Image (tube, rainbow, N blue to C red):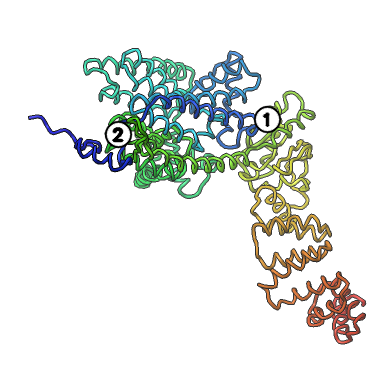
Amino acid sequence: MSPAPRRTPDRVRPAAAAKARSASPLRVHGGSTPSASWFALAAWGVMVAYAAVVLFIQVRLHPVGDVFTETDFYGAYALGARGLQQGHLDPSRYAVIGPVYEFALALVGFASPHLFAAASAISLVSMLATLWAWHRLWSARVNPALALAATALLAVNGQFLRYGYSVTTDALAMALQALALLLLLRGPASARRMAAAGALAALAFLTRYNSAALLPAGLLAIFAGWTGAARTERARHALAFAGAFAALVLPWMGVSLASGAKLAFQLHHNVAYEVFARARGIAWDTYQREMQPQFPTPWSVVARDPGAVFARMLFNLVDHLRLDAAQLAGAPLALAALAGVVFAWRDGSLRAMRPVLAAALLLFLLLVPAFHSERYSLPLLPVWAMLAGAAFTSPLLALSLDAGAGRRVWLKPLLIALPLALATRTSVALQQRTFALLPVEVIPMARAAGTLAAAGDKVMARKPHFAWHAGLEAVPFPFTDSLSQVAAAARAQNVRWLYFSWPEAEMRPAVAYLLDTTSNVPGLRVRAASAKHPAVLYEILPGFGTKPEWAGDPGLEALHRARANVLINRTDWRSRVYVAMHERTLERWTEAQALIDEALAWAPGDPELELLAADNLTRLGSLAAARTALGRAESALGADPRVAVARGWIAALDGNTAEAARWWAPVASIPGDERTLRRMREVFIETRDEPSLAMVEQRLEEMGVRP
């Protein structure tokens, strides 16, 4: 006896269905999938829009790489590509990353005189290839409606957009991964397709080594029958896939090992950093300098504290999923993906997604030992988009409406506008933060250096961006906070220039005062400086390494550090107040007021700061603004005599001597500064307030000042 057919939401009795249709044109569930004729065209529209946005960003808003991920372009990829263009191949360069990206950069670089532009083009084309490949795969394995929804959700994601214009290996690796999965999982299956998929997987691995997850994922898909191959063909297909992978990877590994190089996945260092450094708030630079030599092998990491290693991996397993949902996908997409799992399970489409989910799971597990990073998890983003797309395109709860002529329109897909709008808003904010941190000062500073530097000059800097744009040889800033050791390293390597900007100041806070061009450090001559995005180009002269004259004076040391903090930290209002107080001692009231205003933006309502602002505005003659600031201070300070002194000054400068006397008479016996006491004396003489005048003259005599 055959089993009863599975009941689906649309499997209702014909009579009941006819009655329901005659009663209302609206139904809870959708019928057949809506027409797919326009889905492909709409998806192409999404891709074109994505390309237009990224191209605009590359041309207008992204003139230089950031000081985080894109540092590798200036310090590694561009140099390697130049070497390849000149016929030099050094396998030792590719211990941490594979050679494919630099080969691609060298090839595209032949068509572009600027490698940065070539790298940008690679990223854009790669992300478009990723969108295209995933759209094709989703269309074939699930349906065109989900493919369009997932493509749109993927394209508007902030991280996906960011790495479309960033000059990193991520976009190329992601494209190769997507193309490999497309050949692997979109039939018809054949040994030739499996070999091509294996070759693409190998290229992805030789771009970013975490793409190694594609090898077991591909073999699992083949042997599980997810590629559509007959059982008798699976072993041959698996051999073709793995063989093509090995045919590219093994020869390269052989060349590397023969040249003395070796692949360094740094997995055990990622684990050591996670367990023994990052969990305790220790930065990566500090780990590299002080802790990395303690962990020469994976076994040394486990031997240090097996329990801590195991506990951290369990923690990462959960925490990485949480962070992927919150920071990579974003809450709207993550919630939609969670709902999509339920919809895809109920309507049966989850079975078609199994090979993609399995590949994502393997990659996720491979990343668990490392610290979390959105860019590491970027290849998982299409899976979030796929599951979220299922929530909006499943026929379950589709709310279909009779459109006449036997056609029904689904209403539920309209809800996708909400996550798309929220993701767009989040993406705009992310790009703005990214642009705000770009070291745009590098380009004008490099132009200035071009008129000063000579061919072959070396420059010491924390990041290699300036050296690249200035055409100089980069020398890394040493792992030290000692000025004398920095000078010793510069002399040892015959360095002529020192480039000091906010990344150097943040990572080497003990010498952050080098950002302050008034610090007058012996042996350093300022040749160019940028204020808005702080950076200073110093020429190194004899005597560099000697302590400045102000060293050892706590007040002056604090002043120069505060000046540097003002430049690199816009929220540090205390440093602004400290520098403002110094400006006031020099009677530079305008400069002081600018700093006080900046401080008030980050400490609004602070009564002491409002009182300082009132006094400084009084010195500037801005009496109305001074009254306003004083009113805010008075509400918190109450009967503080300083408020009365300030009120008296405002009245005196406003020509209202009687009011000034009224405010100053109650505080005439309180010691004050000479300037205020002399002005009080004038007011009391004019108003004939003999008792108050006597008290003021007594205060002046106590100060040794003749009235």
Q: In the depicted view, which residue is nearer to us: 270 or 207? A: 207
Q: Choose top left, top right, bottom left or bottom right for residue 471.
A: top right
The amino acid sitting under disc 1 is Ala
Residue 119 in percent (x, y) is at: 58, 25
Direction from residue 72 to residue 645 in the image, left or right:
right
On screen, residue 131 above or below 519? above
Instruction: List the residue tagged with mark 2.
Output: 31
Residue carrying label 1? 467
Residue type highlighted by circle 2 = Gly
Which element carries disc 1, helix, strand or loop?
helix
From where the camera sits, is residue 297 visible? no
SS at circle 2: loop
Is 386 drawn above or below residue 592 in the view shown? above
Tell me: 268 left or right of 624.
left
What residue do we see at 84% from left, 60% from top? 587
Q: Which residue is drawn at 53% across and 32% down?
A: 163
> Closer to us: mark 1 or mark 2?
2
For marks 1 and 2, give the CA distance. Answer: 63 Å
Placement of the N terminus among the 4 image quadrants? top left
